Amino acid sequence: MKDVMTFLNGILVNNNRPWFQEHKDLYLKAQDKINSLAIELIDGISKFDPLIKNLSVNDCTYRIYRDIRFSPDKRPYKTHMGIYVCPNGKKSGLAGYYLHFEAEGSEYLGLNGLYTGLHNPDKDSLRNIREDICYDGAAFEEAIKKAKNFTLDTSFSLTKTPKDFPKDTAYDYLLRLKQYNLIQAMPEDMIYDDHLIEWALEEFKTALEFNNLLNRAGVLFEWFLYLSPIIIPLLIVSSFALSVRWYQRRGK
C-alpha cells in the first residue's frame, strides 16, 4: 500500500498534469496494487454473497481522471482511489461493498475505510426501500446491529418524513434517509497490514443482511426493467386474446 498512499499524498499537493506525467510510473504501481486488491475482494465477497459473480477489475474500479467539464474545481485528478464490489458492477445502482483510500488531508470522504450499502439510489429504488422499511423496519434495524463495527450514516437525511409515508413511527429516522450507507473507519496501522483484505472481508460479511435488504427492492426492479420488453408485449397479446374470446362468447 506504500505506493498507493505515496501517490495519493503526492497528487494532493501537486494536482497538475506535469507532476502526474513525471510520476506516471508511481501512479501505475499504485493502480496495479488497487487492481490486485480488487481481485482479492471480488473473490472473497463472492464466497459469502451469491449476487457477486462474473465481475472484472474494471467493473469495480475507477479512473483517476476527474470530469471537470461542468465543475468550478479544475483539478484534473482525484485524490482518492477505491474499489466498489456490487452485483452487476459499479454502474448497476445496487448496494455493495466499497473499500476507500484517500490522501492525508483530503476532504473527499475524510477517512480511509469501509463503506457498505447504497449511495445515491434512484427515485424508484429509494421508494421501494422506504416501503420495505414501513413493512418491516425491525429487519433493517437488526441488520444494522449485526454490522456491529459499522455506523449508520445519517448525514444525508430529510428534515421531515417523506411524502406519502407514515409520520412519527419508530423507523422515521430510516424513512428520512436519502441514501443507505454504513461506515467504518480503517485503523491507521491496517492500511499497511498484510491482512488488510482479510480484515475487510470479515467486516463486510457482517453487512451482508443489510445489503440484501437494500437489494431486495433494487434487484426486483432491475429484473422488471430487463424483462419488461418481453413481459409487456405478452400481457398485451394475452389481454387482446381474452377480449376476443369474451366477445365471441357474447355473440353465441
Image (cartoon, rainbow, N blue to C red):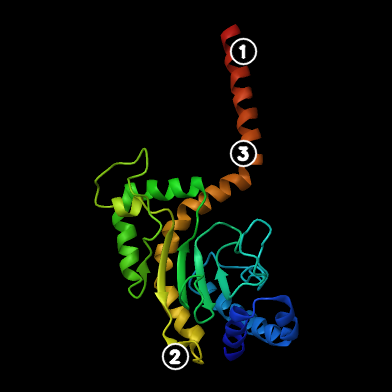
Q: Which quarter of the image is occupied by the N terminus?
A: bottom right
Res. 248 mark:
1
Res. 231 mark:
3
**Considering only order in the chain, which callout, 1 or 3, is on the residue closer to the N terminus?**
3
Residue, disc 2:
189
Cα gap from disc 3 to disc 1, whole angstroms: 26 Å
- Are circles 3 and 1 on residues that touch, CB within 8 Å? no
* Amino acid at pointer 1: Gln
* Amino acid at pointer 2: Asp
Q: Position of residue 129 (x, y in %)?
A: 42, 50
Indicate the quadrant where residue 150 lies.
bottom left
Left or right of residue 99, residue 166 in this image = left
Q: Residues within 10 Å of mark 2 (few under 14, many from 20)?
A: few
Q: Residues within 10 Å of mark 3 (few under 14, many from 20)?
A: few
Residue at 59% across, 22% down = 242
Q: Secondary structure at mark 3?
A: helix
Q: Secondary structure at mark 2?
A: helix
Counting labels gives 3
Residue at 73% across, 83% down = 24
Q: Position of residue 29 (x, y in %)?
A: 68, 87
